[in-house]
Image (spheres, helix red, strand yellow):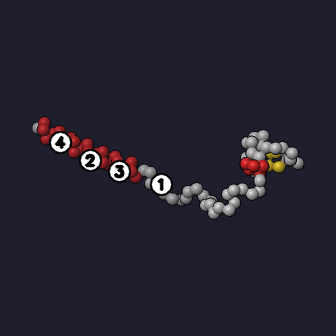
Amino acid sequence: MPFPCPNCGAEVENNALSCSECGSDERTGWSDDTIYDGLDLPDDAFDENSSSEGFKPRRNDLLLAGVALIVLVLFVLRFVF
């Protein structure tokens, strides 16, 4: 009776040496013990509920560019008129 591959979920025959879909085998993914079992790793790589602050620097950059443009125009107009 085939069993699901622990890596990709494809059906693997009992006597197969590796998964035909992903290539996983006893050494890379079928063994019950892994090198990461003893580590206290977090479940999530990042907190999905945290707010993204990627847009604030862009807004500040646009404000700074606008102020710099106004100062430049006033500086040029001072010498023209």
Among the two numbered marks 2 and 4 on one chain, the one whose residue lies closer to the N terminus = 2
Among the two numbered marks 4 and 3 on one chain, the one whose residue lies closer to the N terminus = 3
Measured Cα–Cα span from mark 2 to mark 4 = 12 Å
**Amino acid type shown at disc 4:** Phe
Label 3: element kind: helix
Measured Cα–Cα span from mark 4 to mark 3 = 22 Å
Q: Residue 23 appears at what percent x and percent y?
A: 74, 42
Measured Cα–Cα span from mark 3 to mark 1 = 15 Å
Which numbered dot is residue 60?
3
Residue nearest the observer in this picture, 43 or 54:
43
Among the two numbered marks 2 and 3 on one chain, the one whose residue lies closer to the N terminus = 3
What residue do we see at 23% from left, 44% from top? 70
Which quadrant holds residue 17? top right
Where does label 4 land, which residue? 75
Residue nearest the observer in this picture, 44 or 19:
19
Classed neighbour count for the residue bearing mark 3: other residues with Cα under 10 Å, few (<14), some (14–19), many (≥20):
few
Q: Give the answer, above or below, for where 39 lies relative to 30.
A: below
Label 4: element kind: helix
Q: Note whether residue 43 is visible.
A: yes
**Amino acid type shown at disc 3:** Asn
What residue do we see at 26% from left, 45% from top? 68
Q: Note whether residue 9 is visible.
A: no
Along the horizontal axis of the image, is 22 left or right of 81? right
Which numbered dot is residue 67?
2
Classed neighbour count for the residue bearing mark 2: other residues with Cα under 10 Å, few (<14), some (14–19), many (≥20):
few
**Amino acid type shown at disc 1:** Ser
Where does label 1 land, which residue? 52
Query: Mark 3 and mark 4 in contact (Cβ < 8 Å)?
Result: no
In the rendered image, the residue lying farthest to the top is 80
Measured Cα–Cα span from mark 4 to mark 1 = 38 Å
Q: Residue 66 appears at what percent x and percent y?
A: 29, 45
Which quadrant holds residue 24? top right
